[in-house]
Amino acid sequence: MTDPASTNTENTPPPASNPQEGWAAFLPRLKKIRPPRLFLHEEGLFLLLAVIIGLFSGLAVVCFQIAIDWTRIRLLGSALGPSPLRLLLVPALAGLGVAILVLHVFPRVRGSGVNQTKAAVYIYDGYIPFSTVIGKFLTCALAIGSGQSLGPEDPSLQMGAGIASALGRRLHLSREKVRLIAPVGAAAGLAAAFNAPISAVLFVIEEVIGKWTAGVLGAIVLSAVSSVMVLRVFLGEQPLFRVPPYHLAHPAELIAYAFLGVIGGIASLMFAKLVCYLRPRLKALPRWTHYLQPAAAGLMIGIIGIWLPQVMGAGYDFIDQALHDQFTWKLLIFLALFKIVATSVSFSSGTPGGMFAPTLFIGAMIGGAVGGVEHILFPHLGGTVGGFALVGMGVLFAGFLRVPMTSVFMVLEVSSNYSIILPVMIANTIAYLICLKYQPVPIFDMLSRQDGTDLPSMEEERESETLQVEDAMRPPAEVVLRAEEPVTEAIRKTSGSPHEFFLVSHRSGDWTGVTKEALRGLAKEGKGDSPLARVLPSKLLPWLHPDQPLDVALRQIGDWPLIPVIHRADFNNLQGVIALSDILAAYGAVTDKAYRSKVSLQPSGQQAALGSE
Amino acid sequence: MLLAVFFAITGFVNNRYHATQAALGGHWYARGVEALKANQPLKAVDAFHTALVYSRDNSTYELQLAEALVESDRLNEAEVYLRTLWVREPGNGTVNLELARLAARSSDLPNAIRYYHNAVYGVWDSDPIVHRRETRMELCEFLLAKRERTQAESELIALGANLPPDATLHAKVGSMFLQVQDYPRALQQFQQALKLKPKVKGAWAGAGEAAYQAGDYAEAYLYLEKAVAESSSDLQAAQQLEMCKLILSLDPFGRRLSQTERSQRTIAAFSQALSRVKQCTQSLGVNLQAKQPSTPIEDVYAKAKKMEPEVNKKSLRRNPDLISTVMDLVFQMEEQAEKSCGVPPDPDRALLMIARTRGATER
């Protein structure tokens, strides 16, 4: 995908630096150079491109949201509760249409879009065909607009990434930049869909990229901000939900929020387990059933919608109502349970659409229900149901999507209220820990593994143990020489040792090394009385500290048989020594452990395959 | 170039979209208003909810929804909507008024007063003076219902000072002043009402009652006479009129009375009070012949018996100041008899009312 010729042109020297050639020779070459490259380095172009991607993504998301709404009004009518006939017919027929489009025209648009974007970044060098953007737009607008229980955020994320990828390719960016630009677009798409740039930036960093680097962060922030700006120009300033005023009425309320964390964690587990159970089984059914699965899912959701129309579609209006305490706690529980079922069925049937909105919906309903019960049992606490619904949204985000940082900031950003931070942190942490314990593989990673890809798991990376020098080092060598010692003394000290290489400590805190053979050679040369510092080569040994990552040791060790591990506050205090074999042994132990754990997490069929490997 | 084209297309689509949204919002709002008029609040709630889907932050729709929710007795939901609106526009008169009504319904006195005051001093889209006056009137009615007379009186004073020349309003405020027992101000309001429109309903009776309660029985008589003539079915006015007649016929301190008439009335009052005390003590089985009076009624009876020889036309003519002394004793006898034996018959009640009016005047 990278055009080597084009990258070479960036290094073309200006005419002044090559006076022999002159203008006549340079002009034809100038015509070949595209104007932006004349003025901008790739870094600058990258940031400018991030803004342009943000603008394009913002526009795409505006059109996407309008398309979903327009489809809903056309297909289901403008009333909040459509007629039963429409409810039975529309989602089913639209599901059939979506299935045909997905199976014949846009095969890459299955799924939510998050894993597809990750796959583009890690497998396909940032390549997302533009047809995927169009396909995602059309199929998701039809599916969500017709009432399938899915959301527009993840598709927006993928559309943003697709637009970014297309622009990057069009501008002949380097392979590395094209790979980086997809998350930039993803952040822009998500930021516009959520109308919340901070959450989008954090999500992309937490789930898609997995690391903070200044270069990418700048581009992601620029694209997210510009896309949100576009969205607000067209669709207005109002946030996704109208959040009622919140204050922690009583510290004892935190107990109720902790309880919400537990309930939210259990609900997240149920949701994740159901999706992970249904999806591979529906996918394994004969191909002809794949035409009918979205239709069947639509029919089922339509039937649910006759009694609970709130379950259909993204459900933002009903989240808003839950935030404003407009449902009884019993109804909220029903809505949460049926939304889990409806979304699992919709998603597993292969209908393209996102999981964010349903997650928020379920969280808001569960939070509202817990708040409602608290209100009945402990009316004197005076907590607001809206506060619980809001925290519930964050809880499901942390538990189901497994993005703890984003979940906290999402609630803060949506509520614009810092006082909600305590309940959010408590509830989200509890839910996250419950899910981490009982569903070790996050939902997005599980889905990617079901699809036969092994994308890097950001959570696993976060949670994986980082090997440090102290995990591999040995105790200090029995013989450590001092630089002031004469050679004969050094020979005497080392004569009884089985080792061949010895560390030499200098008063300055530096370390060098010497072999037995070298010492004997010095003695033969008549330098037996000379101190080691004077006769040894001046090449210093690299040194390490116990808390440094082990890969630093791997980079430092070079050809040295061993290097010292010293105290950070006393350079002559030898804490241990480390050799290449120690480093490799430490890595080997961890790899074994990880492999065993991976095999135990795979579905049984894949375990056999891994075992045979 | 591509970006500009995309912007233009999105702008066009967006304009159409917003126009459609606004139209749908208006359509559902109209349906909600119709449903509310047809007394179908549940249907109205659904319609307003739908209208808000298409025009989310429309304050008018939200207010209507809150009203529909109140009508449907879904007070909590209504309150949440109103609070959201309040956060957005804390000075909005309508929102504050609705919140005040909700607080009043749940007997939340401090919040109700707070929101009513906010509404009184808040911003109104149209007719702010009328809205403020009506809101204060509502606040007064609420305070009266909650028996918060002192607060109600202060609100009524503010309300009465800013009334337009409307006889009905003056009469209404007058009756409210009656409820807080501020009879002079009540009388003023009724007089104002009668000045503006002599046939305003209840104004004559109200003025009569105000004067009657204020102890100005001569004036009360005039108003009550007209009230009874106007509405013979007004039993209270008729009773008060009768009492006024009795008081005016018994009161020895009345204006333009001859000395002889005063003396005669004093002797009659003394005789009336003495017989009331006797009857009362008899019913209680008290021995009035005891040498040492042990109860206040025995004590006052003893004083009366001591004074009885002096209570005659001759003595009273010779010493006009004696009328006051005798009447003071009459009032004491009636008060003690009332305390011991309860509500007295009409002539004794009349004497008591004369006593109280005189006491109030002296004070």
Image (tube, coloured by chain):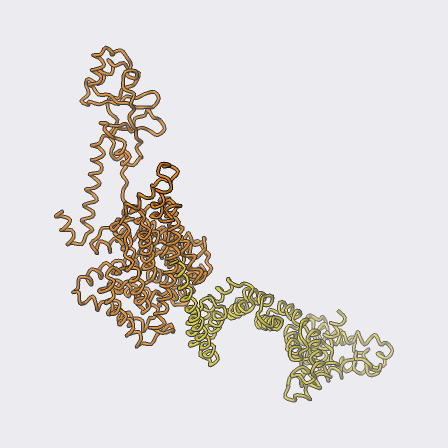
* Rendered position, B43 above or below A47: below
Residue A370 position in % (x across, y down)? 37, 61
Residue A546 position in % (x across, y down)? 30, 32
**Residue B186 vs residue A501: left or right?**
right
Q: Is residue A385 visible?
A: no
**Residue B330 vs residue B103: left or right?**
right
Camera-side residue of A334 and B130: B130
Residue B227 position in % (x across, y down)? 68, 85
Q: How many marks?
A: 0
Camera-side residue of B134 and A357: A357
In the displayed orientation, state which residue is furthest to the left. Answer: A612
* Rendered position, A33 above or below B62: above
Chain identity for the colour orange used in the image:
A
* Rendered position, A300 above or below A257: below
**Residue A115 vs residue B312: left or right?**
left
* Rendered position, A83 above or below A195: below
Q: Is residue A33 visible?
A: yes
**Residue B356 vs residue A452: left or right?**
right
Residue A509, image quadrant: top left
Chain identity for the colour yellow used in the image:
B
